[in-house]
C-alpha cells in the first residue's frame, strides 16, 4: 500500500492538472439548462426527464473519461519512458498497474460525486424538496460508479498491450456490447449448436452493463431490490479483479525496449 | 560483498513481423563490481550499454543469466531499495514541479514523510537546481532534465548508483559540475556504475572500466594501471640529431621534430640510451614515460576483436 497510494495520488494529480475536471462545467451547464427547460415543458414528467438526463449524463461523462484516460494510462508511461524511473524503485509491476487503476477510478468516483451533487441540487430546485424515491437515485449512481470501475479496468487492460487508437475502438465496442448484454444472453438462450456455445461465451466475457442500468426504474420511483445491489456489487468487483489480473499478467511479461 | 555480480546475462529479441528471427543485443556477460568502486561501462553507440542497464533495472527480462545487487537477485524488489538510476534521455511527469517529482520518488523509495521535502530540496541544491524547484518540468531544458535525473537518483541516499550517459545533453560547465558531483558521491563511499562513450569522463572518474562492442564484453581494465605507464616505453627528446643511429641500434624508434630528435624505446634500455647520448655530448631536453590514454585501451580492445578472422576463415 505504501507504493500503491503515491502512484494513485500521482495519477489523480495528472488528471486534475490535465483539466479533466473541466467536464464538470459542461455537465453543470447541461443540468441547469435541462432543469430550466423541462420545467417549462410539463409538470408531470419533468422529474422523470431530469433524472433520466442527469443520470445518463453522469454515466456517459464518466465512461468517456474512463476510456479516454484509461487507454493511454499505461501506454503513455511506456512511450514517454516515465515508467523507467518508477520501476527502478522498489515497485512491483502489478503495484504500479493497480496504483494507476486506483488513481483513475478515484478520479472518476470523485467526478461522479461532484456531478451527483449538482444533479441533486437541480432535482431539489425542480421538485421543491426531497422525497423517498429520490434515495433510489443514489443506488443508480452507485451502479454507475461500479460500471466506471469495470470500464476503467478494461481500458487499462487494452492499454497494456495496444496503442490508444486501437484501445479506444476496443473499449467503445465493449461498452456498446456490454450495454446490450441482456440481448446477448437472450440470443445465447435462443441459439442452437456451436453458435449457442459461442454466444454464451461472449455473453459472459463482455461486461453485463444491462443489470447495472436502473436509471429508468428509479426515474419512475420504483425501488431497487437489495439482492440486485449485492449481486451487482459482487459481479463488478469480481469482473474488475479478473480484468486487472489479466492486465497485470500481460504487463508483467512486457519488455520496455 | 560485491555490489554487483552479473553472470551469463544475455538478451535476444525477436524481430520481424511475420517471420520472427532472433537478434542478440547482449552476449552472455560476466562482470563484478566491488562496493565503493566507480565502474565505467564504455562502448560506442549501440554497443549494448543501455540494454545492460535496462536488464539490471528490470525493464527488460534476460534471455539467460542472472544478476545480483548486494547479493539480492535483480528480480526481487528489495534489490532496488539501495540503488538510484538515472536513465539516458530522461523523461519525467511534466505536469509536476521538480520538488514534487523528487518527493514522489522519495515516497516510492520509502523515505519517511517528514524527510521527503528536505531530501528533495537538498538533492536539487546538489545538482544546481535550487531556484527552480517550483517550476513545472515541462519548462525544463534537456540539460536541466539531466540534472533532475541525477537528483531523483540520489534523493533517497542510495548506496549504489546506475547512471546511463549522465553527461549527455549537458554544456561544458554542466558536465564539469556533474563530474564533480560523481566525484563527491565517490568520496562518500557510493558505488557508481556509469555508462558513457565519452572517454575523458571515464578516465577522470573511474577505478575500472569495461569495454563493450556489438553486445560483447571486449575487456576490463584498472584505469590507474592503464594510465600509469610504469612498465611501458619511455620517450627521450634532445637537441640536434647526434647519437640518433646509436639509439636506433638499441631498438629505439626515432623521429626528427624541428631542431630536436625524439626517440621512443623500452624502459629497460633507458640507461644504455642515456649513456650513448652522454657519450656524444647530446643536450637532453626531456625524458618521460609514454602515457597510455583510456582511448588507447578502448581503441585497442575494439580493434583487437574486429581484426579477429572469421571462424570459418580461420578453420580453412
Image: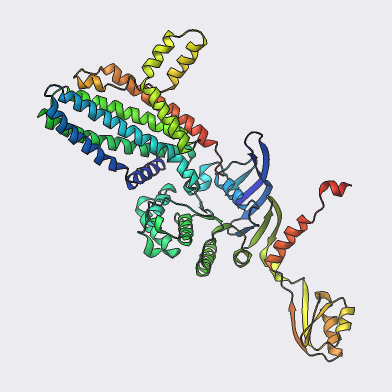
Total of numbered circles in the picture? 0
Q: Position of residue A96 (x, y in %)?
A: 45, 40
Between residues A126 and A256, which one lies in front from this camera angle? A126
Q: In the figure, residue B62 lies in which quadrant?
A: top right
**B241 to B217, vertically: above or below:** below
Left or right of B24, for residue B69: left
Q: Position of residue A147 (x, y in %)?
A: 34, 27
Q: Quadrant of the N terminus of chain A?
A: top left
Residue at figure coordinates x 45%, y 14% from the top left: A200
Which residue occupies the extreme left position in the image? A128
Q: Is residue B71 visible?
A: no
Q: Position of residue A112 (x, y in %)?
A: 27, 34
Between residues A14 and B122, which one lies in front from this camera angle? A14
Q: Position of residue A98 (x, y in %)?
A: 42, 36
Q: Quadrant of the C terminus of chain A?
A: top right
Residue at figure coordinates x 74%, y 72% from the top left: B230
Residue at figure coordinates x 18%, y 36% from the top left: A32
Between residues A2 and B299, which one lies in front from this camera angle? B299
Amino acid at each position: 500500500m505504501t507504493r500503491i497510494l503515491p502512484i494513485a495520488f500521482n495519477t489523480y494529480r495528472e488528471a486534475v492538472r490535465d483539466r479533466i475536471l473541466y467536464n464538470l462545467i459542461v455537465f453543470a451547464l447541461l443540468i441547469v439548462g435541462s432543469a430550466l427547460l423541462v420545467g417549462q415543458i410539463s409538470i408531470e414528467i419533468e422529474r422523470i426527464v431530469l433524472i433520466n438526463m442527469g443520470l445518463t449524463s453522469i454515466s456517459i461523462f464518466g465512461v468517456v473519461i474512463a476510456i479516454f484516460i484509461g487507454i493511454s494510462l499505461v501506454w503513455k508511461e511506456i512511450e514517454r519512458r516515465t515508467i523507467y524511473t518508477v520501476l527502478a524503485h522498489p515497485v512491483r509491476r502489478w503495484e504500479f498497474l493497480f496504483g494507476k487503476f486506483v488513481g483513475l477510478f478515484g478520479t472518476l468516483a470523485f467526478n461522479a460525486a461532484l456531478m451527483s451533487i449538482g444533479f441533486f441540487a437541480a432535482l431539489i430546485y425542480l421538485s421543491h424538496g426531497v422525497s423517498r424515491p429520490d434515495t433510489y437515485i443514489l443506488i443508480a449512481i452507485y451502479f454507475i460508479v461500479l460500471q466506471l470501475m469495470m470500464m476503467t479496468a478494461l481500458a487499462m487492460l487494452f492499454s497494456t498491450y495496444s496503442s490508444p487508437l486501437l484501445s479506444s475502438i476496443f473499449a467503445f465496442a465493449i461498452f456498446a456490447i456490454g450495454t446490450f448484454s441482456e440481448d446477448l444472453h437472450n440470443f445465447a438462450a435462443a441459439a442452437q449448436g456451436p453458435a449457442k456455445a459461442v454466444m454464451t461465451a461472449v455473453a459472459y466475457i463482455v461486461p453485463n452493463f444491462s443489470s447495472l442500468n436502473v436509471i429508468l426504474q428509479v426515474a419512475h420511483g420504483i425501488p431497487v431490490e437489495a439482492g440486485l445491489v449485492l449481486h451487482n456489487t459482487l459481479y463488478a468487483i469480481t469482473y474488475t479483479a479478473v480484468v486487472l489480473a489479466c492486465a497485470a499478467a500481460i504487463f508483467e511479461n512486457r519488455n520496455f525496449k | 560483498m560485491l555490489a554487483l555480480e552479473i553472470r551469463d546475462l544475455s538478451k535476444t529479441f525477436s524481430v520481424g513481423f511475420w517471420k520472427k528471427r532472433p537478434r542478440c543485443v547482449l552476449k552472455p556477460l560476466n562482470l563484478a563490481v566491488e562496493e565503493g568502486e566507480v565502474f565505467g561501462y564504455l562502448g560506442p553507440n549501440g554497443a549494448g550499454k543501455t540494454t545492460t542497464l535496462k536488464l539490471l533495472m528490470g525493464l527488460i527480462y534476460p534471455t539467460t543469466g542472472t544478476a545480483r545487487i548486494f547479493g539480492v537477485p535483480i528480480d526481487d524488489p528489495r534489490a532496488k531499495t539501495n540503488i538510484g538510476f538515472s536513465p539516458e534521455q530522461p523523461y519525467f511527469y511534466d505536469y509536476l514541479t521538480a520538488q514534487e517529482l523528487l518527493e514522489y520518488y522519495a515516497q516510492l523509495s520509502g523515505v519517511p514523510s517528514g524527510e521527503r521535502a528536505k531530501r528533495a530540496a537538498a538533492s536539487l541544491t546538489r545538482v544546481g537546481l535550487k531556484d527552480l524547484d517550483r517550476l513545472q518540468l515541462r519548462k525544463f531544458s534537456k540539460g536541466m532534465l539531466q540534472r533532475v535525473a541525477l537528483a531523483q537518483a540520489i534523493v533517497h541516499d542510495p548506496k549504489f548508483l546506475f547512471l546511463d550517459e549522465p553527461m549527455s545533453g549537458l554544456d561544458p560547465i554542466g558536465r564539469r559540475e556533474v563530474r564533480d558531483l560523481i566525484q563527491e558521491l565517490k568520496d562518500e563511499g557510493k558505488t557508481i556504475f556509469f555508462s558513457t562513450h565519452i572517454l575523458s569522463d571515464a578516465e577522470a572518474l573511474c577505478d575500472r572500466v569495461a569495454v563493450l562492442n556489438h553486445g560483447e564484453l571486449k575487456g576490463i581494465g584498472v584505469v590507474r594501471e592503464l594510465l600509469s605507464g610504469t612498465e611501458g616505453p619511455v620517450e627521450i627528446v634532445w637537441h640536434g640529431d647526434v647519437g640518433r643511429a646509436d639509439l636506433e641500434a638499441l631498438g629505439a624508434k626515432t623521429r626528427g621534430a624541428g631542431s630536436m630528435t625524439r626517440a621512443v624505446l623500452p624502459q629497460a634500455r633507458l640507461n644504455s640510451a642515456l649513456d650513448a647520448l652522454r657519450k656524444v655530448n647530446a643536450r637532453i631536453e626531456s625524458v618521460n614515460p609514454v602515457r597510455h590514454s583510456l582511448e588507447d585501451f578502448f581503441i585497442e580492445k575494439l580493434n583487437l576483436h574486429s581484426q579477429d578472422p572469421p571462424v570459418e576463415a580461420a578453420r580453412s
